[in-house]
Amino acid sequence: MALLTGWASFLVAVATIGCIYGLLTLGLNVHYGYTGLLNFGHVAFFAAGAYASAIVTMPPPSTVTNASYEIWLNLPMPLGFPVSLAAAALVGGVLAFLIGLTSVRLGTHYLAIATFALAGVFSDVLVNEAWLTNGSFGMNSVPKPGRAMLTADEWQLAYLAFAALSLLVTYLVLERLVNAPFGRLLKGVRESEAAAKTLGKDTNAVKLKSFVIGGMIAGFAGGIYAHYLGSVVTAQFVPHVTFTVYAAMLLGGAASNTGAVAGAFLVIAFEESTRFITTAYNWIQSTLPEALSGVLPALFGPLPNNPSFIPSMRFVVIGVLFVLVIRFRPEGLFGDPAEIQALGEEED
Amino acid sequence: MSPNQTPADGNSGDAAASADLLEVDGVVKRFGGLVAVDGVSFGVEEASITGLIGPNGAGKSTLFNCITGVYDVDGGAVRLDGEEIQGLSPTTVARRGVGRTFQTPKTFRGMTVRENMAFAARHQTGERALGALLRPGTIREEEADVQARVDDTLEFLELDHLADEYASGLSGGQRKLLELGRVLMLDPEIIMLDEPVAGVNPSLTDDLLARLRELNDRGRTILFIEHDMDVVMENCDRVVVMHNGQTLASGPPDIVQDDERVVEAYLGGVDR
C-alpha cells in the first residue's frame, strides 16, 4: 500500500532536506551571524560528517561492487545509528578545529578565501584518497536505519520525524547558548576584536570555539544526510551547498536561529520548485485561449530541451534571491536591523 | 635615565619609582626607519591622575599601544606593580589590570549599551560553552550580579536612560562614556584613556571630567592622553609631555606649564 503518492512523497522529501539544510544554516549562523566569521567552506564540514557516518557504517568492501575503501566498521544499524551521528559531529568539529587553528586569526575576507580554498583542498582529498572514501565512485551502501522494519513510505515519514527532532533539539541548544553570556561573548568578538581583546577576552579562542561548534552541527547534518540518501558521493559536496546555506541564512536573517531555520526551508522549497518550471509553462500554455497561444513562446521561446537546463536554473534562482534580499531587506525575515546594520563592516 | 629628564622631574627618581603602579622605562618602538617612541620613561603613581600630552605625532597613542600589548616594544620595559608586562598579548595585559579606551571609540555597535557593558565583566561561567549549557543556576546568579553592576555604572555615567539602545545609535560623546563604562566593568588597576574628551561637546566634556575626578577620588589610577592644555592642567596631578617620541618634561602641571621647551614644542618656536 502506497502511503505517499506524488505530491505527498515529494513534500516529505523536501521537508527532510529542509531539516538537513536547517541544521547546516544553524551551524553557519554560529560562524557568521553570531561571530562574524566569513566561512566560505561550510560544505567541507558537511562532507566530513557524511563521510564519517559512511565509513563507520559501510558493510565490508567484498559485499559492495566497485569498492576500493579499506576502512569500514559496519556498525549494526539501529544501534549503530547514534554512534554514527556522534562520529559525524565529532569529525565535523575536528575538521573545523584544524581549519580554524590555521585560519581563524585571519580577518573578514581573508578568512573567506582561506576557508574556501581549504574546502576545495578537502574536496580533492575526498576524491583522491580512495582507500578511505572510495574516490569519486562514492560510498553507496550506507545503511538506512530501521529501513528493514518499515515500508518505504513509513521509513520516509519516520526519518523526517527524526530529522525534525534533531533540528528542534539543535535549535533549542543553540538558543540557550546564544542567550547566555557565551552569545554575548561571540557578538562582542564579531563587533570589534580589538575592543574584546582590551577587555581581557581571548578572541582567537572564542573564534575557534565558534568554528568548532558550527562545524559540529554541519557534521551532524552530514551524518543525517548520509543515512537518508544511503549514499555519499563527492559530487554532492560542491561549493553550491555553501552558497545555498548563505542564501538561507541571509534570507532568514543572520544572528537569528529562528531565521536560519525559516530561511533554510524557504530556500529549499524555492529551489525544489524550479523542478516544476516546465510543468508550469506547459500548463499555462495549455490554458491560454487560442488567440494568445503565440505569446509565451514569443516571450520565452520554447524551453531548451537540454536536460541540464532546469538544474542550472536553480543557480540563477539562488543568485536572484541573494541579490533581492541584500538589496531590499538586508536584515532578512527575522534579523534585527539594528544588529545587522554593522555586520561585516571593517572596524577601523 | 633618559637624557631628556627635566629638573622638574624630581619625584620620579629611583627611590620613588618603586611606588609607581605603572612604570614606563625607556620604551622604544620603531616602524621601519621611523622611531615613533624613542626611549620614553615615566611613572604613574597609584591613585593619581596623570595626563600625557604632546603635539600630533608625538607618539602618545603609539605608547598606549606599547603599554597595552597591541605593539611589541623594540626596547625598554613596561612594569605594572613591578612586574614586566611588555610583550604580553593585549588580552593578558587587560587581565593583569590595564583597562584602556581608544581614540575612536570601539563600541560593539550591533549590541545594546547594556550588552556592551556586561560583556566586559570578568570571570563569567556562562562565557564557556559547556558552562552556558549545563550550569543555568550559577549563570543566573552571576548574571544578576553583573546586571546590578551594569545598572550602577550606567547610573554613575548618566547613561541609564540609554541602557537598551543599540550602541550604533549613540552620539560620539556617549560612545566615549560607554567605552569608559566598559573599562569600569573590567575593573582594572589602571584606566588608560586615549583622548577621552576630544570631539565631545563642551557640556558633556565637563561632565566626563567630573566623572574622572570622582573615580580618582574613589582611588582609581588614571592615565589619559589629551591635546587640550587647559583640560590637562586643571585635572591632573602630574603631566608627562611627549615630543618627537621622547619625554620632553614631566612633573606637576604648574611646573611643566612654564617649561620653555614645552612652550616651544607647542607654539613651534615663535621666537626664531
Image (cartoon, rainbow, N blue to C red):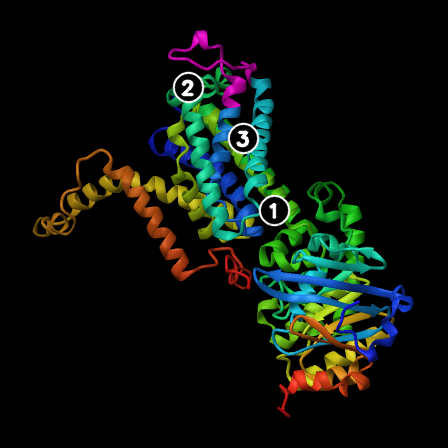
> Closer to the camera: disc 2 or disc 3?
2
Camera-nearest residue between B130 and B89: B89
A93 in relation to B218, above or below: above
Residue occupying the point 12% across, 47% down: A297
Q: Name the residue located 64 percent from the left edge and 64 percent from the top edge.
A: B112
Instruction: Report in which chain the residue with disc 1 lies.
Output: A
Q: Amino acid at mark 2?
A: Asn
x, y percent for residue A279: 23, 39
Mark 3 or mark 1: which is in front? Answer: 1
Amino acid carrying mark 1 in the image? Lys
For the magenta stretch, what is the residue range? A53-77
Q: Nearer the viewer, residue A285 or A79?
A: A79
Q: SS of the residue at dot 3?
A: helix
Residue A197 left/right relative to A326: right
* Mark 3 surroundings within 10 Å by alpha-carbon count, few (fewer than 14), some (14 through 19), many (20 or more): some
* Majority secondary structure in the magenta region: loop
**Residue farthest to the bottom?**
B271
Residue A64 covered by magenta stretch = yes
Marks 2/3: CA–CA distance = 22 Å
Give the residue displayed 66% in from the left and 54% down from the top.
Answer: A184
Instruction: Give a yes or no on whether discs 2 and 3 share a subunit.
Output: yes
Image coordinates of residue A141 in percent, x first then y, are 44, 17
Q: Which residue matches tag 1?
A: A207
Q: Is residue A118 left or right of residue A281?
A: right
**Residue tagged by mark 2?**
A140
Query: Along the polypeptide, which appears first: circle 3 or circle 1?
Result: 3
Q: Nearer the viewer, mark 1 or mark 2?
A: 1
Residue annotated with mark 3 = A162
